Amino acid sequence: MSALPTTARGIATRRRILDAASAEFAQVGLAGARIDRITAASGANKAQLYAYFGSKEGLFDAVIADRVDTSTEGVAFDADDLPGWAVRLYDQNLHFPELARLIAWTRLERQPTGRWFDGAQHESKLAAVEAAQAAGRVRAGDPADLLILLIGMASAWSPASSVYTATADESSSDHDRRRALLRDSVARTVMP
């Protein structure tokens, strides 16, 4: 089990390691990542890295959890505005493509199955969808399946896409067209 830092300095070091590792893993994946590059970029040493994360695999898992949590907190969720939420996810993927790249590496190197993420922030979304379903504002069905479908729709143009990767430097009219299509498609999907 890895140790969590208790001092402000330790917390800052752990954060620098996570940020450096996130960039490294997003670029070259788990297998291609090098601890020496991560420690050099973070200004930390190997002893600190292993004390906080246990192993390179433990660090990768911590990076994924951190980036998912950051993304979850950064995109306001409203079960009564799932089309708007999907558009906000599109924009999150557009402006912060690192998470989509990390997820792609996870799919390639870990080949996960089933539901990947659990936690209070995800459970609260599922509960909100269930409440909206009970009130007749969202179509019936498994809330997790519904959110997975919407995340997939919002990620259709992300770095995790197998068809097209949008970038922030494309024309605003391209992004507006995709946002409108996404909003309409999600609205049609979630309507009761």
Image (spheres, rainbow, N blue to C red):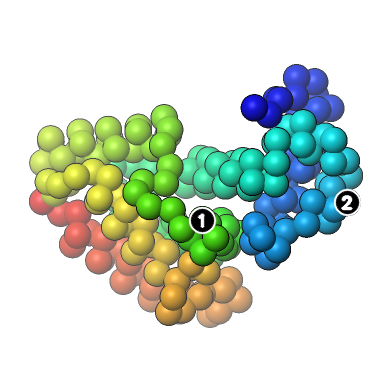
Element assignment for label 1: helix
* Residue 66: % across, % down: 59, 41
**Amino acid type, mark 2:** Ala
Reading the image, the residue beneath label 2 is: 40
Does any portion of residue 143 appear in the rendered image?
Answer: yes
Q: Nearer the observer, disc 1 or disc 2?
A: 1
Side of 172 relative to 8 (left or right): left
Side of 36 relative to 116 (left or right): right
Q: Residue at x 15, y 47 (%)?
A: 141
Q: Is residue 8 above or below residue 47?
A: above
Q: Quadrant of residue 2?
A: top right
Side of 163 relative to 182 (left or right): right
Q: Residue at x 48, y 43 (%)?
A: 72
Q: Is residue 112 above or below residue 5?
A: below
Q: Residue at x 40, y 69 (%)?
A: 156
Q: Residue at x 42, y 46 (%)?
A: 116
Could you say which disc has been placed on residue 110 in the image? 1
Element assignment for label 2: helix
Does any portion of residue 41 appear in the rendered image?
Answer: no
Measure the alpha-carbon separation of dots 1 and 2. 26 Å
**Amino acid type, mark 1:** Arg
Q: Quadrant of residue 17?
A: top right
* Residue 120: % across, % down: 41, 30
Q: Is residue 72 above or below residue 171?
A: above
Could you say which disc has been placed on residue 164 in the image? none
Choose the circle earlier in sequence order: 1 or 2: 2
Side of 5 relative to 186 (left or right): right
- Please identify the quadrant where the N terminus is shown: top right
The 10 Å Cα crowd at callout 2, few under 14, some 14 to 19, many 20 or more, is few
* Residue 164: % across, % down: 46, 79
Verify CB contact (< 8 Å) between mark 1 and mark 2. no
Residue 11 vs residue 190, the one in the foreground:
11
